[in-house]
């Protein structure tokens, strides 16, 4: 049970840090390589570069905390 509480705290801290990064103007979601297609009433957004960047950052963070 103790590890679950620590994980929840870590996730909360990560959400706060992520919110601050977005709030301070880091262009998360508008990076080169993100695909946005608009045609008529249809809109498709594929955040490929953003997903890769977040994956690398989270992988490094979890590796450091392990």
Image (tube, rainbow, N blue to C red):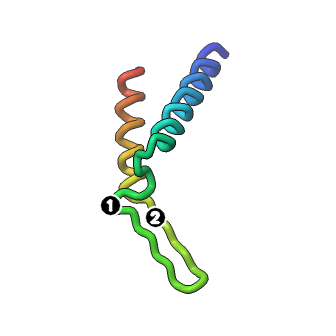
Q: How many marks?
A: 2
**Residue at the left extreme of this rendering:** 32
Residue 55 vertical placement versus 4 (above, below): below
Residue depth check, mark 1 versus mark 2: number of the one nearer the observer: 1
Considering depth in this image, is 1 or 48 the residue closer to the camera?
48
Image x and y of residue 12, in percent: 59, 28
Query: Which residue position holds label 2?
Result: 46
Picture quarter with the N terminus: top right
Residue 9 vertical placement versus 20 (above, below): above
Residue shown at 48% from the left, 43% from the top:
22
Considering depth in this image, is 24 or 64 the residue closer to the camera?
24
Query: Which residue position holds label 1?
Result: 32
**First of labels 1, 2 by sequence position:** 1
Residue 2 picture quarter: top right
Instruction: Please tell me how crowded label 1 is: few (under 14), some (14-19), or many (20+) other residues with Cα within 10 Å.
Output: few
**Residue at the front extreme of this rendering:** 24
Residue shown at 37% from the left, 37% from the top:
57
Q: Would you say 50 lies left or right of 42 here?
A: left
Residue 43 vertical placement versus 4 (above, below): below
């Amino acid at each position: 049970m103790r590890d679950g509480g620590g994980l929840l705290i870590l996730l909360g801290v990560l959400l706060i840090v992520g919110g601050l990064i977005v709030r301070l103007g880091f262009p998360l979601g508008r990076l080169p390589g993100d695909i946005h297609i608009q045609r008529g009433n249809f809109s498709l957004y594929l955040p490929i570069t953003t997903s890769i960047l977040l994956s690398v950052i989270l992988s490094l963070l979890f590796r450091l905390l392990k």
